[in-house]
Amino acid sequence: MKLRIVSWLLLVISISILTVSRYHSEWIQTDILLLASNDGFPKDIEKIQSQVNQKLQGAVLWVLVSPSEEASTLAKDTQQLAGKLKNSSVLSSVEFRWANDKSLSSEWNFLYPFRYQLLNSNDRALLYREPEKLIQQQINAIYGPGSVAIDLNGDPFSIFRRYFTFPIDSQIEIFDGIPINKVGEKKYTIIYSVATPFDLGGNANTPLLSLQKKLKDWAGNNGYHLLIAGSPLHTEYAASRAQREIRIIGGISIIAICALCIFMFRSLFPLLASMFSILLGIFSGIAGVIIVLGQMHILAFVFGTVVSGLAIDYAFHFICNRLRPGPPGDSDIFHGLLLGLVSSCLAFFSLCLTPFPLLKQIGVFVGFGLLGAWLTVFLLFPAIIKLDSRPVTFFDNIPKINPKIYYLIISGILILATVVIPQVKFSHDLNLFYQAPEFLVSDEKALNTLVQSRPESSYFLVSGNTEQQVLSREWMLRSYLEKLKKQNIIKNFRGVTDRFPPNKVQLKDWQLLKDFYKKNLVKDFYHKLGFKADEVSHKIKETNQPFYTASLMEWSAVAGNLFKGFWLGCDGNRCHSVVRIYGLKSTMPDLKEIPGVIYIDPTSTIAEIISQQRDQLISLLPIILIVVLAVTVLRLGPMQAIGVVILPLSAVFATVSIIILMGYSINLFHVAALLLIFGIGMDYAVFSHTSHRKEQHYTQLSITMAGSTTLLGFGLLALSDTQAIADFGLVLTIGLLLSLILTFLYFCTRGESKNT
């Protein structure tokens, strides 16, 4: 016995040391986009995509809306709001003075030498077709009532000024460097911020949501309406809700297990031992995730809480077996426990064969959790569990039935399945993971209506071997996006080439401007302004500037906030940029093939991956069935193995038939639940088929207790607000009930059977 305890301690210590060596503070994830990976992209593209998604996920937009306040007052209160945001620990950066930013001045100074080779699309079109119109436009600007300061020496036709300010709405008012936007009678300001990574910290605190509520109250008290939007708000809400569900589900399960143990065993020690096996199961699951995968999503942790209901199965089987009269027959129970463990672990670890992160994490967490609980029971329980034998008479009055009735029911289930399953419909809705609360949705809708320049979550990723190749490919993409603008499919787009076109385009524009300044139209323009002939010649000569070149790295170092983040730089022999989409009004049409250009829509990507993994998981089911059957045949022989496997298989077929008849479309988590039903049902089937008649009452007791606690845990999952968890729990609840019913019916045939 001492050897068992020492072996168990050495195992726990070894796992603990290995877990500590692999541990890092970010092992728990909350970002919904991390639930999927896309193996269709090369690794470098996937890495860049992940970086861009993380940047997008960190942004929080604060829009202060005033129905009637003066612009100067709104600017002052915006500055006060920004101060409150800067003082908050939940935000890492806050920016609001876009019109008076030092980076704009730095960018202007950097690009100014390039002014004779940079053109916006409107001026380029005028220079090609109607240069006289551009000249008249400048004369009107000089002599008109709304005239502005014009740099007649360096930028006589304001071409560079228009180029530099082209993407910016020129109708906004500026107060103290703060842009005041106006839509109808409403004025509003925008504050951009980046949230600090959400720290779960073992609690369900919501610091960003608390700040949101506090500042909304402040805005309301000052006559404003504050709109707030950003992924961190949803991440925090989903994570805190998941944590609450973990506590509720886990807590109620533990309370139910405690009550059941005390009622059935009438002793505190079996309860403590059972709870200890659960704790070791959860510890082993977490250790397995950290060691094998390095990280786990909070949703996987919610799913994985069912390990508490499964881990205690082994404890119940062992304890109930110890209640039998006579000397402990541990070897009798361990054969069944081992076969049950192997079948269950095959079901759970098979989830690791899919590339879907959430399923991998669930498989590793529950699989290693079961291994830890089983080893605790196998190594530790024989040395510490001492119980007085007690007769079990709960099942003495159960009526016996003819085995033919049992197999008739099994046949009926299989016939029903052949009729119903062909009618199956499939689903891969992203709402499975998360449905936003109304208070966040309403803000986003109002903000999107008001702020027309808010980018979509989808974007184009442009890649190439050099900076110029990336710019050339992005320039090709622009022509495609311009067509979409004309078709009213998108409102706008923005990328690096808005500010820094490829050299070949700049060279053409440089030549176009050189030819323009040689025209008599330009000389006439200066003469109309009162310049003498020698002065005109001198000014035209000044426009004859050389062609300049610069690297994108130099420009990105001084790029203004409007274009910050569009250039992703070069890594090795690959360079990347991002083109953002604004106002997408329908599904993005298929892009005509442009080398190195990929359209990335995180939402549809996850939906597509959910669909792919659902199909892969369905294809795993027959493979798992064959493997489990082969293992069972080696232990029990062909005939008994078929009898064992037919029970969980019938439960699976009956469950999927019921779900279809209830009108559900089958999704990934339904399929994952069916896989687990098979694994858990195998556990029940193994014990019911391998127990001798003299011990079947104790086997029935252990299966009933194990099934009750597991059913309670899964039943609570069905009440979750997260659709994926609810679907998972609903299917498991139905499947477990059916597994228990079929197991009970099988026991009812034992009195009619001549076999022992």
Image (tube, grey):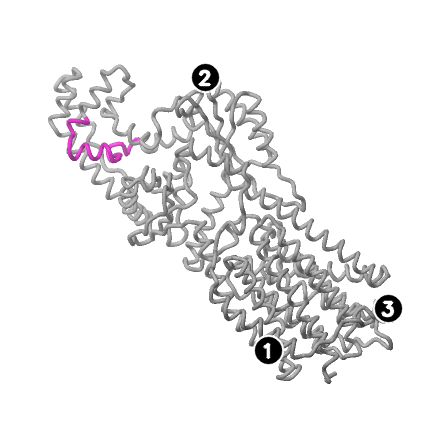
Furthest toward the left, the residue is 520
Q: Tell whether position 127 is magenta.
A: yes
Please indicate whether residue 344 sits to the left or right of residue 252 in the image. Answer: left
Nearer to the camera, 295 or 404: 404
Q: Determine which residue is flagged by label 1.
A: 629
Asked whether the viewer can see residue 17, the reply is no
User: Callout 2, which amino acid?
Assistant: Glu
| Image coordinates for residue 430, horizontal then vertical, percent | 49, 51
User: Callout 1, which amino acid?
Assistant: Leu
Image height of 635 relative to 274, above or below: below
Mark 1 lies on a secondary structure that is helix
Mark 2 lies on a secondary structure that is loop
**Magenta: predominant secondary structure element?**
helix
Numbered mark located on residue 129 in the image:
none
Q: Earlier in the sequence, mark 2 or mark 1?
A: 2
Count of numbered marks: 3
Residue 283 image-quadrant placement: bottom right
Nearer to the camera, 494 or 439: 439
Residue at (24%, 16%) from the top-left corner?
A: 144
Numbered mark located on residue 70 in the image:
2
Q: Determine which residue is flagged by label 3.
A: 386
Residue at (44%, 56%) from the top-left corner?
A: 608
Image height of 145 relative to 737, above or below: above
